[in-house]
Image (cartoon, coloured by chain):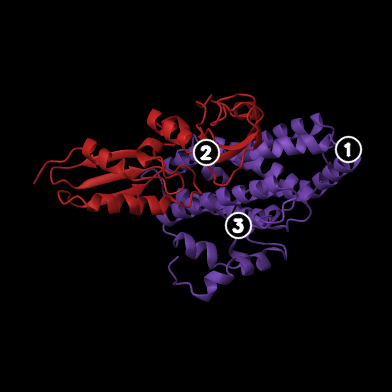
Chain colours: A red, B purple
């Protein structure tokens, strides 16, 4: 039996994509908060929810399990979701931010520690990079997105909203 | 949770039930705006907030399950009105948009402060989810504050509507803070600072915002109590009947 490390597991999980935003992996989204592998290659993965009401929670647990079950070297696989680590948008990796941008979603600003409308008001446009934009609504098509409009390229766009 | 003795468990259950039931019922009411919002953005806002509330209620019911209660779906979908610990405020029909908006403002401000307090709870599993909910509800209070300020300082009609909604909501809102049987135990065990402390802080926050934009806080009002003792208005049972209609067709169905 080949010995497997938590880095190996992390690499496998980079292939598991957010079901609602397919270009970003769950690793880059920052929701994989714990990976443990014991001597028998039993794996314990901990996820944290982006939002308590996110309908994709159970689906993502199943996707993680499914992906790891493809690896014949692994023993028992346990996946659980807990709030032990609070997910914030600061946990999104640099690679993850690029993936969001490529998908046409403005990446979240670094969490300034407080949240007021001005935090969301000049979100850079993912199409033309202008900051001459306005917030249309802090609620969008999914819980993690907000609605914006770019006055420069006259384009409506969505942002991934900062959560602290 | 070794620190819990029996009295602590009972007190924690009571607290969890009222929070979870409030979230479930207000979540359902918010969802009634789906497709009917006065503008598209409000339609989406109330629908998103409904989704947050329902998700939060599920996690609170999961904590109850850890303490020995039935699982989340069973607790949420198989009880009758006389087993719900929610306050009267959340069960009132959505009414016109002004009522729903004012309720959203008053209720969510109380929730936000409650979660903020619970971040320091000695009940670690509750503190953990409070940390999460606190970040989510900021978007709700931000939304409510923006609209209340705008409409309370808008034209004559919008001002009058906000004032009359406030008058209607006020006794119901005070009912949120109906003291439970276990206030002393919760405080002594460091689980929760109690409804009285919550109400005091809430009153300060909402009074400031409402009076700053010219609204008048109603005086000499009798709070609408009873919800925490599972005594409800006639509005709750029809809501539950509707909410559980599909579940009741086949409770064993896998979704």
In this rendering, the answer to whether A124 lies above or below B84 is above
Q: Is disc 3 surrounded by few (<14), some (14 to 19) or many (20+) residues within 10 Å?
A: many
Image mark 3: chain: B
**Residue B196 visible in rendering:** no
- Dividing the image into 4 quarters, which one contains the N terminus of chain B? top left
At horizontal 28% and vertical 50% (from top left) the residue drawn is A67
Q: Which residue carries the number 3 mark?
A: B85
At horizontal 34% and vertical 49% (from top left) the residue drawn is A80
Residue A127's spot in the image, x, y percent? 55, 31
At horizontal 57% and vertical 68% (from top left) the residue drawn is B244
Image mark 2: chain: B
Residue B141's spot in the image, x, y percent? 65, 38
Q: Residue furthest right?
A: B156
Counting residues from the start of the chain, the first of labels 1 and 3 encountered is 3
Q: Which residue carries the number 1 mark?
A: B155
In 3D space, how far apart are the residues under numbered discs 3 and 2 (Cα atoms)? 19 Å
Which disc, if any, is residue A63? none
In 3D space, how far apart are the residues under numbered discs 1 and 3 (Cα atoms)? 39 Å
Per the image, label 3 sits on a secondary structure element best described as loop
């Amino acid at each position: 039996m080949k010995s497997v490390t938590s880095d190996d597991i992390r690499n496998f999980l980079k292939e598991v994509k957010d079901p609602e935003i397919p270009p970003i992996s769950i690793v880059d989204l920052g929701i994989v908060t714990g990976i443990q592998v014991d001597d028998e290659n039993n794996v314990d993965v901990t996820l944290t929810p982006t939002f308590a009401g996110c309908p994709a929670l159970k689906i993502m647990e199943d996707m993680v399990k499914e992906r790891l079950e493809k690896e014949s070297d692994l023993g028992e696989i346990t996946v659980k979701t807990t709030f032990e680590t609070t997910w914030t948008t600061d946990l999104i990796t640099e690679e993850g931010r690029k993936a969001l941008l490529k998908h046409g979603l403005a990446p979240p600003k670094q969490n300034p520690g407080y949240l007021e409308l001005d935090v969301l008001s000049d979100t850079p446009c993912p199409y033309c990079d202008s900051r001459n934009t306005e917030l249309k609504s802090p609620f969008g098509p999914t819980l993690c997105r907000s609605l914006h409009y770019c006055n420069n390229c006259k384009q409506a766009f969505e942002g991934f909203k900062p959560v602290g | 949770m070794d620190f819990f003795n029996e009295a602590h468990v009972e007190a924690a259950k009571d607290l969890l039930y009222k929070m979870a039931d409030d979230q479930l019922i207000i979540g359902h009411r918010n969802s009634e705006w789906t497709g009917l919002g006065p503008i598209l953005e409000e339609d989406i806002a109330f629908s998103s907030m409904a989704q947050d509330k329902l998700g939060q209620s599920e996690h609170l019911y999961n904590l109850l399950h850890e303490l020995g209660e039935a699982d989340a779906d069973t607790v949420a979908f198989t009880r009758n009105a006389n087993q719900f610990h929610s306050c009267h405020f959340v069960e009132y029909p959505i009414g016109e948009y002004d009522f729903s908006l004012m309720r959203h403002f008053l209720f969510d401000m109380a929730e936000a402060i409650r979660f903020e307090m619970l971040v320091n709870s000695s009940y670690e599993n509750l503190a953990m989810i409070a940390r999460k909910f606190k970040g989510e509800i900021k978007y709700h209070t931000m939304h409510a504050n923006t609209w209340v300020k705008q409409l309370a300082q808008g034209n004559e009609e919008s001002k009058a509507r906000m004032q009359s909604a406030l008058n209607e909501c006020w006794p119901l809102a005070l009912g949120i803070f109906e003291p439970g049987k276990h206030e002393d135990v919760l405080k002594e065990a460091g689980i929760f600072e109690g409804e009285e402390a919550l109400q005091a802080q809430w009153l300060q926050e909402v009074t400031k915002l409402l009076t700053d934009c010219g609204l008048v806080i109603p005086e000499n009002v009798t709070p609408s109590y009873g919800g925490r003792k599972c005594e409800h208005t006639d509005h709750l049972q029809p809501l539950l009947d509707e909410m559980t209609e599909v579940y009741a067709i086949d409770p064993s169905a896998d979704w």
